[in-house]
Amino acid sequence: MNDKLNRTMLSEYYGSDQYSTRVAKLFHRWSGYEVEFWDNEELVQFKSMFEKSKYYAEDACENWVTGI
């Protein structure tokens, strides 16, 4: 069974200006949060953040799309 099918997307973040090709997607699973970082429609990085809070995962998404 593919674990990724057992998650819910909570939000998507979009970059602007020089980072307009960046997208971050925040997911929730029973075990915690996961984040996907995309650039030019290509998955750059996937992070499991099961030990972290929702706010931490949201900050990671915002940092990605703003270039921090």
Image (spheres, rainbow, N blue to C red):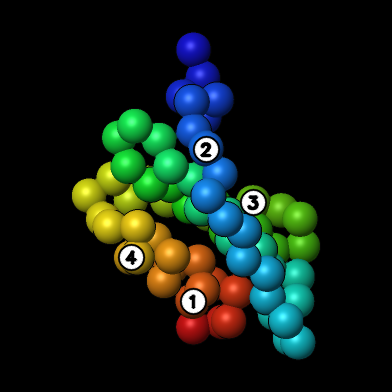
Q: Earlier in the sequence, mark 4 or mark 1?
A: 4
Instruction: State the residue at coordinates (33%, 50%).
Output: 49
Question: Which residue is farthest left?
Answer: 51
User: Label 2 belongs to which residue?
Assistant: 8
Q: Earlier in the sequence, mark 4 or mark 3?
A: 3
Q: CA distance from mark 2 to mark 1?
A: 21 Å
Q: Earlier in the sequence, mark 1 or mark 3?
A: 3
Tell me if mark 1 has few (under 14), some (14-19) or many (20+) residues whose alpha carbon lies within 10 angstroms of its own. Answer: some
Side of 38 where 67 appears, left or right: left
User: Label 1 belongs to which residue?
Assistant: 63
Please name the amino acid that badge 2 sits on.
Answer: Thr
Q: CA distance from mark 2 to mark 4?
A: 17 Å
Image x and y of residue 1, in percent: 49, 12
Residue 27 vertical placement versus 6 (above, below)? below
Tell me if mark 3 has few (under 14), some (14-19) or many (20+) residues whose alpha carbon lies within 10 angstroms of its own. Answer: few
Q: CA distance from mark 4 to mark 1?
A: 10 Å
Q: Earlier in the sequence, mark 2 or mark 1?
A: 2
Instruction: State the residue at coordinates (53%, 49%).
Output: 10
Q: In which quarter of the view is residue 37 placed?
A: bottom right
Please name the amino acid that badge 3 sits on.
Answer: Leu
Do the residues under discs 2 and 3 have CB atoms within 8 angstroms?
A: no
Do the residues under discs 1 and 3 have CB atoms within 8 angstroms?
A: no
**Helix, strand or loop at mark 1:** helix
User: Label 3 belongs to which residue?
Assistant: 43
**Mark 2 or mark 3, whichever is nearer to me:** 2
Instruction: State the residue at coordinates (30%, 35%).
Output: 31
Do the residues under discs 4 and 1 have CB atoms within 8 angstroms?
A: no
**Helix, strand or loop at mark 4:** helix
Please name the amino acid that badge 4 sits on.
Answer: Tyr
